[in-house]
Amino acid sequence: MQQRNLKPILKWAGGKTQLLAEISHVYPDGFGKTIRRYAEPFVGGGAVLFDILSKYELDEVYISDVNAELINMYLVVRDQADELIAILTNYQTEYLACGDECRKQYYYNKRDEFNELIINGESKAGVKSAALFIFLNRTCFNGLYRANRNGLFNVPKGDQANPLICNVENIYAVSAALKNVQIVCGDYSASKSFIDKHTLVYLDPPYRPLKGRDSFISYTETEFDDSCQRALAGFIEEINASGAYIILSNSDPKNVDPEDDFFEDLYIDYDVQRIQAKRRINRNADLRGYITELLIKNY
C-alpha cells in the first residue's frame, strides 16, 4: 500500500509520538502479512494507531477507550469531518485574532461550554462536543485531559503562541483512515471478542505512578491503581492464551526504586524491555527529562 502520513489529532498526556521508533521496532514479524488485525483498547491520542494505519494495510482494526468524549471525537472525525472542520476553522480564526487577555477569556468560555454539555449529558455525542474537545486539547496546558470529582474538565489554558487548532489536511486523512475501524466506548475487556491469533494488541493503560513524581493518571473519574494493573495482567493472560501478539507500555518503577519488581513479577513469563523516554508533564522542571519506560511483550 502507499504509505500515508497520519498524525494524531490531539496532544495527549503520555502520548507515544516520541517513542514510535522504539515501539514500531518490536512490531511482530509478519505484521501486515499473516497478522492482519489490530486492537488498541486504550487508544488515547492514537500515536501508535496512526503509525500502523500509515504503514500497513490490515483486514480489521478495533480501538476503544473509556473516555466517552474522546471516542465521540474519533467518531465525528470519521463520519462528520466537513462539519467538524467548519467549526474548528472558526474557533482557530477567532482565537488567533485575540490578544493574550482575550485568548484567556475565549479559552475559559469554551471550557464552560464544554462543561455545560457534560452537565446536560450532551458531551458524549455530536459535532459541537468533538470540536470543543479538540479546541481545548490544542490550547490547554500540555494536552492534559483531567476532570474534577464532578466529571468537569478543569485543565487551565496553556501558553502556546500559535497553536494549530484545525489541521484540515490531517483531519481529512485521518477521517479516511478510520472509515473501516471499529470505534468503541468501553474498557479494555470489551476488546476480548475481537482478539484472536491473527491480532496484534497494543495496550497503553494509565501508568503506575512513580514515587515522588507528579502523575496524571485520572483521564476518567476512576483511578487506575495496583489492583487495576493486576486485573489488566489477568486480561492479558487471557488474550495471550488466544495466541494474540501483545505489546504493553507502562512506567518503570526502577527509575526511583531499583528494588521495585512490580512489573517483573506481574509479567514473569513475558519479555520486559526498557526504553528511554522524555517526559515533560511535571510541575517540577527538575523532574522533567529522560527516564526509562517499559515495553512488555509476549513474543
Image: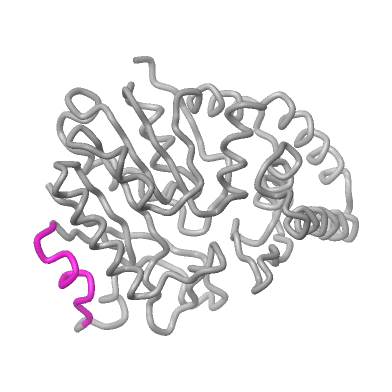
Coordinates of residue 135 in the picture (x, y in percent): 72, 46
Q: Quadrant of residue 254?
A: bottom left
The quarter of the picture where the N terminus appears is: top left
Based on the picture, tell me whether residue 265 belongs to the magenta stretch.
yes
In the foreground, 15 or 287: 15
Say above or below: 242 vs 181: below
Locate residue 158 relative to residue 53 in the image: left or right.
right
Locate residue 98 relative to residue 185 in the image: left or right.
right
In the foreground, 269 or 5: 269
Based on the picture, tell me whether residue 285 belongs to the magenta stretch.
no
Locate residue 281 relative to residue 150 in the image: left or right.
left
Coordinates of residue 47 in the picture (x, y in percent): 44, 43
Q: State the residue at coordinates (51%, 46%).
A: 185
Count all numbered tags in the image, as a single digit. 0
Magenta residues span 260-270
Q: Residue furthest left?
A: 269
Q: Quadrant of residue 128?
A: top right
Q: Quadrant of residue 64?
A: top left
Q: State the residue at coordinates (66%, 71%).
A: 148
Say above or below: 78 vs 150: above
Q: State the residue at coordinates (52%, 58%).
A: 13
Coordinates of residue 104 in the picture (x, y in percent): 84, 60
Q: State the residue at coordinates (42%, 84%).
A: 212
Coordinates of residue 39 in the picture (x, y in percent): 34, 40
